[in-house]
Image (cartoon, helix red, strand yellow):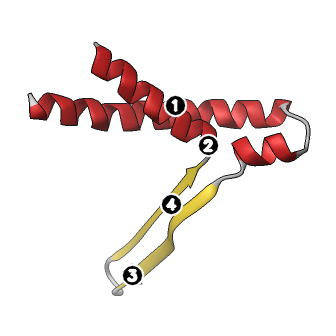
Amino acid sequence: MARRKLGHIVIGIIVGGIIGSALSSVLSGIFPKGPVKNLFFSALKIGFSAIEVNTGFFNFTIGLGLNITLVTVIFIFLAIYLLHKI
């Protein structure tokens, strides 16, 4: 039972994050400039920039970044709630 709940949380975070980010991107172009747009669509950027390692014969780059908006957070909680009710 606990694994099922953990699975719902992980799937809810992924699905809610994807849908919330896409909707946030679309809606931010529709809203006029102002405090409401700033509240809902200003992104909190978390992560680190790309780090490149070059050994001469082997080269790789690693980086991670998340842009979290209020709309994304709302959709994450909504997805988790809906998956919990199923």
- For numbered disc 4, what is the local secondary structure? strand
In the image, 50 versus 65, the foreground residue is 65
Foreground: disc 3 or disc 2 = 2
- Name the residue type under label 1: Phe
Disc 1 target residue: 75
Q: Residues within 10 Å of mark 1 (few under 14, many from 20)?
A: many
- Name the residue type under label 3: Val
Q: Where is the C terminus found, in terms of image quarters?
A: top left
In the image, 25 versus 4, the foreground residue is 4
- Name the residue type under label 4: Gly
Q: Where is the N terminus found, in terms of image quarters?
A: top left
- Horizontal and vertical percent for residue 19? 53, 29
Counting residues from the start of the chain, the first of labels 2 and 4 encountered is 4
Counting residues from the start of the chain, the first of labels 3 and 4 encountered is 3
Q: In which quarter of the image is residue 29?
A: top right
Disc 4 target residue: 65
Counting residues from the start of the chain, the first of labels 3 and 2 encountered is 3
- Horizontal and vertical percent for residue 85? 30, 15
Q: Which residue is drawn at 71% across and 44% down?
A: 41
Disc 2 target residue: 70
- Horizontal and vertical percent for residue 24? 66, 36
Q: Is 17 placed above or below 4 here? A: below
In the image, 27 versus 80, the foreground residue is 80
Mark 3 and 4 residues: CB-CB less than 8 Å, in contact?
no
